[in-house]
Amino acid sequence: MKLIMKINLKHVTASLMLAVAFTGFTSCKNEVNSPGYEFAPDMYRSKSFDYYGENVLGKGENTDTVYTNRLPVKGTISRGYLPALPTGMSYEEAGLKLKNPLVYSTVVEKQGEELYGKFCVHCHGAAGAGDGAVGLKLPGPPPAYTSGAIKNLSEGKIFYTITFGKNSMGAHASQLTAEERWKLVYYVQKLQGPKETKSDSTKVASVDSLKK
């Protein structure tokens, strides 16, 4: 019995000594939230710069802090980026000056149709008659694409309207890229049908001729 108690006491003493030693090693830092010493912390804590964080390597002579969200070089645009509208261009100017930069094809038009089904059909209806489920509940439902001045609306004005909105229609620039908006323009032109009068866009006639 005494032998067993002596052995147990030795085990307890050894355990206490290990606990004290471990506590000493892990409590060397004064920071309360410090995890102590870590093994290979860079395996789970990235050393790369955070978005919109400070970039300590880019400090200049006249600034204390440089952030990672730096502006691109003046006069350049991102690869694959399609500029939308010149600053300050009005609705009427867009009708006269804006031309679809995308080459027409049935594939591009089909992509425009898919976008129409996602973003436009609920108000304008499947055929562009203004009879969408949401459009019919508006104080004034959207006019049909084949009616009056809407039928002869130029590509520039269509693009401008999709970008900034008009009347009850809100802006869609935040939901659609400029390229997607131009694809959508092609499909809206298809729903308009052939123009009844000369348009203020010189490209509409060539687009209509491709669709025949």
Image (tube, helix red, strand yellow):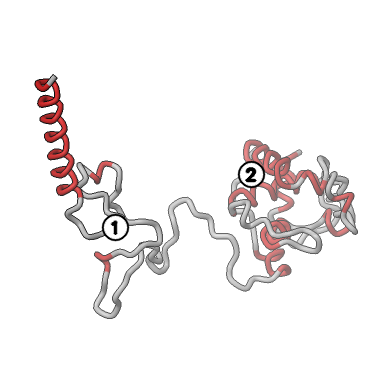
Q: How many marks?
A: 2
Q: Crowding at label 2, few (<14), some or many (≥20) Cα neighbours within 10 Å? A: some
Which of the pair 155/164 is nearer the observer? 164
Q: Position of residue 132 (x, y in %)?
A: 84, 45
Q: Position of residue 118 (x, y in %)?
A: 70, 42
Which of the pair 156/138 is nearer the observer? 138
Q: Is residue 189 left or right of residue 132?
A: left
Q: What residue appears at the point 88 percent right and 51 percent down from the top-left corner?
A: 137
**Kind of residue at badge 1:** Val
- Residue 167 is labelled as none
**Depicted 168 relative to depicted 61: above or below:** above
Which of the pair 111/189 is nearer the observer? 111
Q: What residue appears at the point 27 percent right and 67 percent down from the top-left corner?
A: 58
Q: Earlier in the sequence, mark 1 or mark 2?
A: 1
- Residue 32 is labelled as 1
Element assignment for label 2: loop
Q: Position of residue 33 (x, y in %)?
A: 31, 55
Q: Position of residue 128 (x, y in %)?
A: 82, 46
Q: Is residue 107 left or right of residue 124?
A: left
Residue 3 location, quadrant: top left
- Quadrant location, the C terminus: top right
Q: What residue appears at the point 26 percent right and 41 percent down from the top-left corner?
A: 43
Q: Crowding at label 1, few (<14), some or many (≥20) Cα neighbours within 10 Å? A: few
**Kind of residue at badge 2:** Tyr
Which residue is labeled 2 in the image? Answer: 104
Specify the farthest residue to the front: 1
Q: What residue appears at the point 67 percent right and 37 percent down from the top-left corner?
A: 110
Element assignment for label 1: loop
Which of the pair 5/23 is nearer the observer? 5
